[in-house]
């Protein structure tokens, strides 16, 4: 029985390949331009498959807090630059952080002064030096309340490695950057970048994790084992 099933699957697999090969592939450079898809185009389709999205800012904040707790990420709020710097200073003292990696942007110079050593990802750097940093601090494009996901582009961080190599990742954001769901995040980046999209976007949902071995959850398997989001009011 198992042999017949395998043969049948094999035949169907090659039949589909043969059918696909009947369609001539376009010559390089002759592809049609890709249309920009907005959330309005997705109304009644993708959103029907997603969990309900919050309809107000308060509801989004409440749902975001719940989702971050579920995925073992941390959420803090602070009022202004002084509160932000004091909060990061407290975390650095608790964790004995010495080296920070970050990029240019609002609040970053003040955050860097908390640490004895700082690596700027906007400038030339060695990957080994980045790996030895205790923590990375970045801005983000948006935070998706529906899933507790952080959306970051290379236009923000200048480096995809910045949010992946240090064992702790701190994300700085404002309340205005919290969006209800993924289609709303796509709308936001379409409006922000237009046709000049960055080379890469990264969606980060909680600390890096795996449960491949005996279904035992391990954090920090392929990236940061700690994700901290700070909302600055």
Image: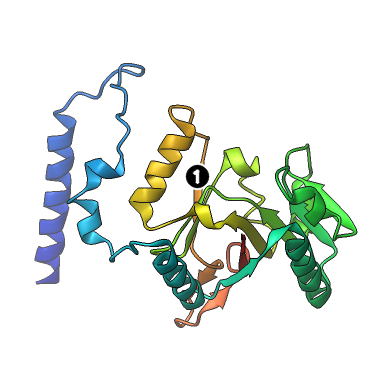
Residue closest to the far right? 116
Q: In the figure, is residue 232 to the left or right of 180? A: right
Give the image location of residue 147, x and y in percent. Answer: 41, 64
* Other residues around mark 1 within 10 Å, as few (<14) / some (14–19) / many (≥20): some
Residue 161 lies, in percent from the top left, at 64, 49
Choose top left, top right, bottom left or bottom right for residue 98.
bottom right
Q: Residue at x 12, y 50 (%)?
A: 11
> In the drawing, does residue 152 fall left or right of residue 188?
right
Relative image position of residue 46 (x, y in whole percent): 24, 53
Look at 72% across and 45% down and name the residue there. 103
Residue nearest the viewer, comparing 81 with 123 = 81
- Give the residue number, with chain letter if any, for mark 1: 201
Q: Residue at position x 34%, y 49% from top? A: 183
- Image quadrant where one finds the N terminus: bottom left
Count of marks, rendered view: 1
The part of the image, by quadrant, that contains residue 112 is bottom right
State which quarter of the image contains the C terminus.
Answer: bottom right
Residue at image position (41%, 37%) is 190
Q: Nearer the viewer, residue 67 or 199?
A: 67
Query: Which of 136 and 23 lies nearest the eye of the viewer?
Result: 136
In this rendered view, identify the residue nearer to me: 59 or 137.
59
Q: Please indicate, yes or no, whether residue 159 appears anywhere in the rendered image.
A: no
Q: Is residue 211 above or below residue 99?
A: below
Label 1 SS: strand
Colouring convention used in this rendered image of the protein = rainbow
Coordinates of residue 141 in the picture (x, y in percent): 53, 47
Q: Is residue 172 visible?
A: yes
Q: Is residue 152 above or below residue 9?
A: above
């Amino acid at each position: 029985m198992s042999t017949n099933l395998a043969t049948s699957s094999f035949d169907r697999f090659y039949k589909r390949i043969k059918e696909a090969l009947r369609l001539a592939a376009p010559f390089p450079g002759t592809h049609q331009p890709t249309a920009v898809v907005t959330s309005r185009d997705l109304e009644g389709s993708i959103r029907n498959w997603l969990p309900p999205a919050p309809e107000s800012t308060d509801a989004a904040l409440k749902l975001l807090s719940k989702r971050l707790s579920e995925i073992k990420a941390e959420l803090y709020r602070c009022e202004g630059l002084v509160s932000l710097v004091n909060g990061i200073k407290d975390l650095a003292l608790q964790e004995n952080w010495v080296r920070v990696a970050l990029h240019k942007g609002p609040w970053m110079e003040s955050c860097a002064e908390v640490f004895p050593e700082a690596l700027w990802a906007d400038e030339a750097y060695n990957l080994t030096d980045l790996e030895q940093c205790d923590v990375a601090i970045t801005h983000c494009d948006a935070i998706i309340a529906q899933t507790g996901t952080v959306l970051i582009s290379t236009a923000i961080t200048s480096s995809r490695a910045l949010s992946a190599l240090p064992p702790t990742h701190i994300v700085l954001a404002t309340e205005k950057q919290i969006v209800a769901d993924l289609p709303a995040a796509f709308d936001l980046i379409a409006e922000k970048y237009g046709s000049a999209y960055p080379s890469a976007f990264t969606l980060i949902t909680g600390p890096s994790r795996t449960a491949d071995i005996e279904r035992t959850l391990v954090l920090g398997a392929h990236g940061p084992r700690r994700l901290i989001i700070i909302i600055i009011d």
